[in-house]
Amino acid sequence: MNSSRLIILGVAIAAAVGAGYVAKRMTARPSAPAVVQSAPPEPAIELKDVLVLSQDVAMGSVLGEALRWQSWPADTIGENFITRQTDENAVEELKGAIARVPLYSGEPLRRSKLIGEGQSFMSSILPSGMRAVATQIAADTSAGGFILPNDYVDVIMTRRASSGSGGAAEGFITETILKNIRVLAIDQAIQEDEEGRKVRVGDTATLELSPEQAEIITVAQQMADRLSLALRPIVDASEPTESGGDYLVSGNGRRGTVRLIRGGEVSEVGAR
């Protein structure tokens, strides 16, 4: 077979293949267009402006510029939240308010966490029926200075023992007169300082006491050579407070009497 015939044969084969491909494309059924189903639109969420903290505010500090409005879903707003809808001037009105507890950035502000107008700070954080009593303590023996406000302590009284008519000293008597008492302040500090210092050495502690406990510690301050605080673990905070020094201010079941100890002799006198 000569070359001219080979060329003609190759062209014929190529033409046949091309014709077959074109015929196949022409007879193929067009594919149906893809149908995209869109999801139903989500219902609109109702939003309301809520007054929140824009920065942390320490207990006892003025709110100042730490207030701003923030949009919140209406169905998550608590009844104690402050909203622009009900109190649109709240930002200006509360700039001078004082925090009675620590407040944190992003937290919705509640009026119950602020000190009421005309109230002092200490009286506002004191629970109903309790008393705040400041007492001198032995700074060098009060848990090495590791006692901070809101810790719980035992109050230990140490006094000299004497015997006989001569009143010669015979060592010391130590007893726990109050147990599981909350510390409100050490000196003038009611919380840790801004530098995060964890140790505070002070010589005056303000304690949260019942009226009866206030009487006990008042008498103890007159009798004791030293009052010390013993730090308790935080897990004991839920335990009830106890008074081990009831005998100092009670006698024969009568309130208003004081038991005096002089030269080893015990006597009771009516309180005036």
Image (cartoon, rainbow, N blue to C red):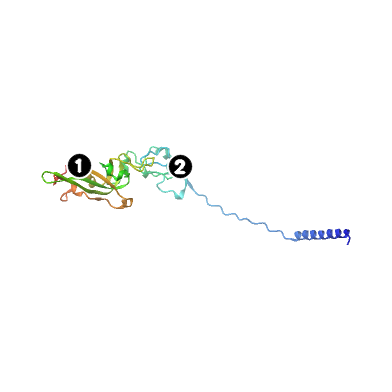
Q: In this orientation, which residue lies closer to the viewer: 111 or 156? A: 156
- How far apart marks 2 and 1 lie (CA) works out to 54 Å
| Apparent side of residue 141 relative to residue 42 in the rendered image (left or right) | left
Q: Nearer the viewer, mark 2 or mark 1?
A: 1
Residue 257 shows in the view: no
Residue 152 is at least partly visible in this image: yes
Q: Residue at x 45, y 50 (%)?
A: 76
From the image, tell me which residue sits under label 1: 222
Mark found first going from the N terminus, 2 or 1: 2
Instruction: Say whether residue 96 is left or right of residue 227.
Output: right
Question: Which quadrant of the rendered structure holds the N terminus?
Answer: bottom right
Report the amino acid beneath label 2: Trp
Counting from the top left corner in percent of width and height, residue 15 is at 82, 59
Q: Residue furthest bottom?
A: 1
The amino acid type, in three-letter code, at marker 1 is Gln
Give the tally of numbered discs: 2
Outermost left residue: 165
Checking the image for residue 69, the label placed there is 2
